[in-house]
Amino acid sequence: MTERVLAPFGRRRCEVVANRASGGYRIVSALDREGPEPRPGQFYMLATDRWGGPGGRPYLPRAFSVAEVERAGEGVRLDFLLEAVGPGTEALAALREGEALAITGPLGRPFSALGELAPTAAGAILVGGGIGIAPLALLRRELAARGVAQRVLLGFRDRRHAGGLELFACSPAGSPGGRAPRMSSEVRTASEDGHTGHQGYVTDLLAVLLEGDEAAGAAVYACGPPAMLEAVRGLCAAGEVPAELAMEAPMACGFGSCFGCAVPLRGGGYLRLCVDGPVVGADRIETALVAGSGH
Amino acid sequence: MDLGLDLCGLRLEHPILNGSGTFDAIAARRAFGDELDARLPFSLYVSKTITPEPRAGNPAPRLYETPAGMVNSIGLPNKGLAGFLDDDLPRLAALPVPLCVSVMAPSRDGFGVLVERVAGRVEVAALELNVSCPNVHSGLIVGERPAETLALLGSLRPLTDKPLIVKLTPNCADPAAVARAAEEGGADAVSLINTLRATALEPRTLAPWLGAGSGGLSGPAIRSLALDQVRRVAAEVSIPVVGMGGIESGADALAMLSVGASAVAVGTASFRDPLAAERVRSELAAALDLRGLSGLPVAGLVSTSS
């Protein structure tokens, strides 16, 4: 799972084949006729023809990890989960079927296979928060196809800032081999307003799991807002549980050229999240509280 | 169409370069594989700026999107001279085009060591002297002062016969005066513009957004200003001028060439599309063809009056 899939050089245009609401989020699907199938955790730089609209923004493309992939006859359908919070995501959310989505990717380092992250681990715990649940959907499917036992913990702020749960439905269409795998995972949710699942943080659920017997044989894969990732990092460090975090940082290019997405390394220096991440071993970084992310 | 040109003794296949620090070919190879070398869209590859000692770069955040552009305060992260020569140079030398290495030091002596050691390597075709980066407080922004620029060139020119290209800053009263000083000091070419000093604020707290406090503006937002500075510099020096600043299309490149640039660099546009420079080149060829021109140079052939 760790081998990154290389991107075709340059930006290409894909046709938007669906754009549907999912709770407070959107799922934008595009048909990529030229690119390869990405690995879970890899991302794409996205833009539309409406870039540079009123006010001259957005100007830079936006980075999104891929939430679901389906091999279609003439290419690969890529699903992106997004929430309209600024000029870039608003333009992406407004895409209509048949319009063009400009993409560069797949980019970055994907999640490691369970055996590489934790050679003795018996199962995986996936922890997602908000829009950051996206790459875990693809990861979950891949782990299930390999027969890895999983627990999936998904957290949201409130009803308006929640969605994408159908990406974790038991029988997603178009699974590898053309038949839906039986899911071995258990999805549990948390929300700060209590509209779904446990009222509180998703990391409350993780803390309980890590206190139990399962912690000894588990590894954690997480993606979400910086505060959530930092809490996950702290819990895993305390429990000596191997963990990988899919992180976010302001990023202009996505392929290592702008040096904008610098994340401080434990012991000094920086890594570039776009080429050295976005999936990073939790023990490599000083903190997951990356300045400027989420802007 | 043959877009070939001679740029201070270097035979280039076309006039489209990269701006220093806007395209990391080594990282791009990790993302795009062999296709990077097969389709590198630049005729001369300009490295990120190398400093004598390693630099980690500035604290985050380092980027801020603006209308039609961005502000950056990256802080020249690099492996330092020794790390560059050992690790990066062999990999950059494998690129299919000549290599220009950008160097910067906090002192004349430091610059001298960089120029001697870098120019001494057969893999290096040319050097760009970064005297204009607004992100690093070297205590001496040479490129803002003609006399300092002249003195720096005076100490570096005897060290190598390879082309020395002076990267000019737009953050001074009279870039053309600095360009004249660079020419007088023996520079083979000048390149401009670097980023414009800029600040961004966090909207709620109104505190500086960038980790380093301020940064430099790039992108189409600065294109008209860049075009004017290139025009004024090109009118006052006889050495070649490499024009850059917000270039995104063949029309933009043609404009730069028409006001006197010999070559054009693509920078921020590569962030949006790593192959933006390839499109700029093909659009430029089409634009020249449309005007009945068979190649370069175009300055003087295309009317820039009114």
Image (cartoon, helix red, strand yellow):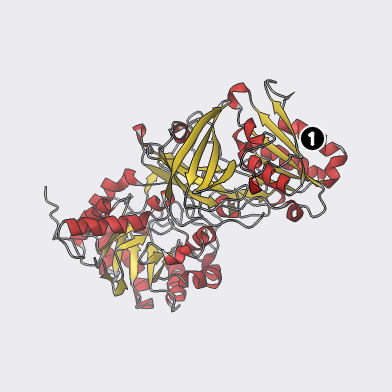
- Given residues B302 and B39, the one toward you in this image is B39
- The answer to whether residue A129 is left or right of residue B42 is right
- Given residues B179 and B41, the one toward you in this image is B41
Residue type, label 1: Ala
Q: Position of residue A165 (x, y in %)?
A: 64, 31
- The answer to whether residue B288 is left or right of residue A63 is left
Q: Residue at x 76, y 48 (%)?
A: A242
- Given residues A26 and A216, the one toward you in this image is A26
Give SS at disc 1. helix
Q: Position of residue B253 (x, y in %)?
A: 27, 55
- Given residues A115 and A129, the one toward you in this image is A115
Q: Quadrant of residue B148?
A: bottom left
- To which residue does mark 1 refer? A207
Q: Is residue B269 above or below residue B293?
A: above
Q: Position of residue A81 (x, y in %)?
A: 56, 36
Q: Residue at x 12, y 54 (%)?
A: B303
Q: Is residue A104 above or below residue A212?
A: below
Q: Is residue B284 above or below residue A243?
A: below
- The answer to whether residue A294 is left or right of residue B135 is right
